[in-house]
Amino acid sequence: DGSSVDFGSVCAIRNIRHPISVARKVLEATSHCILVGDNAKKFALKHGFKHSPTSELVTADVQDEFKRMDKFEKSVNTIYNRKGLDHDTVGCVCRDAFGNIASGTSTGGITAKL
């Protein structure tokens, strides 16, 4: 929230579509600034967000890629050192008529990072 400089965020939340909307709900409905993992998911479900199976959130091609890369000790380097293959994070920054700035960002992570 650009006018108050308050923020909400979620990390390591699984099987919830549109986690940035959950982050907004953290901002609006709690005094916390971050919820992580299982607690973030419990919060989301409690506030009306629906569980989404992995098959609805991750394409079959990406699931196959994960299975292939899981065999390699250095899979992140194997994936991201190839030419033409980028890893993207999306973000948005907005300014209203009063000069208040708000922003959001989201990333799907990197295959087999851990």
Image: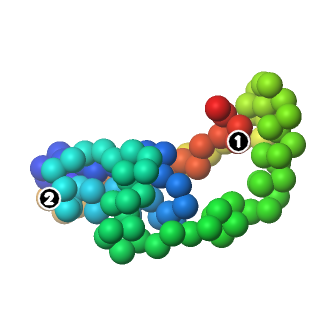
Image-based side of 6 in relation to 61, left or right: left
Position of the C terminus by quadrant? top right
In the figure, residue 47 lies in which quadrant?
Answer: bottom left
As drawn, is 6 to the left or to the right of 20? left
Please tell me whether residue 34 is drawn above or below residue 80 in the rendered image: below
Residue nearer the viewer, 57 or 4: 57
The reply to whether residue 39 is visible in this rendering is yes
Q: Nearer the viewer, residue 58 or 43?
A: 43
Mark 1 or mark 2: whose residue is earlier in sequence: 2
- Secondary structure, mark 2, is loop
- Per the image, the residue denoted by label 2 is 98
The amino acid beneath tag 2 is Phe
Q: Residue at x 82, y 38 (%)?
A: 69
In the image, residue 106 sits, relative to residue 58, either above or below, namely above
Q: Are marks 1 and 2 in contact (CB under 8 Å)?
A: no
Q: How is the image coloured?
A: rainbow
The quadrant the N terminus occupies is bottom left
Q: Residue at x 38, y 53 (%)?
A: 40
Q: Nearer the viewer, residue 95 or 19?
A: 19
Using a 10 Å C-alpha cutoff, classify the residue at mark 2 as few (fewer than 14 neighbours), some (14 to 19) or many (20 or more).
few
Q: Give the structural element (helix, strand or loop) at label 1.
A: loop
At 70% from the left edge and 41% from the top edge, which residue is drawn? 111
In the rendered structure, which amino acid carries the disc numbered 1? Thr
Position in image of residue 99 (x %, y %)? 18, 53
| Crowding at mark 1 (Cα within 10 Å: few <14, some 14-19, many 20+) | some
* Residue where numbered disc 1 is placed: 111
Q: Position of residue 26 (x, y in %)?
A: 27, 56
Residue at point 43% right, 51% down? 38
- Alpha-carbon distance for marks 1 and 2? 41 Å
Q: Which quadrant of the view contains residue 84?
A: top right
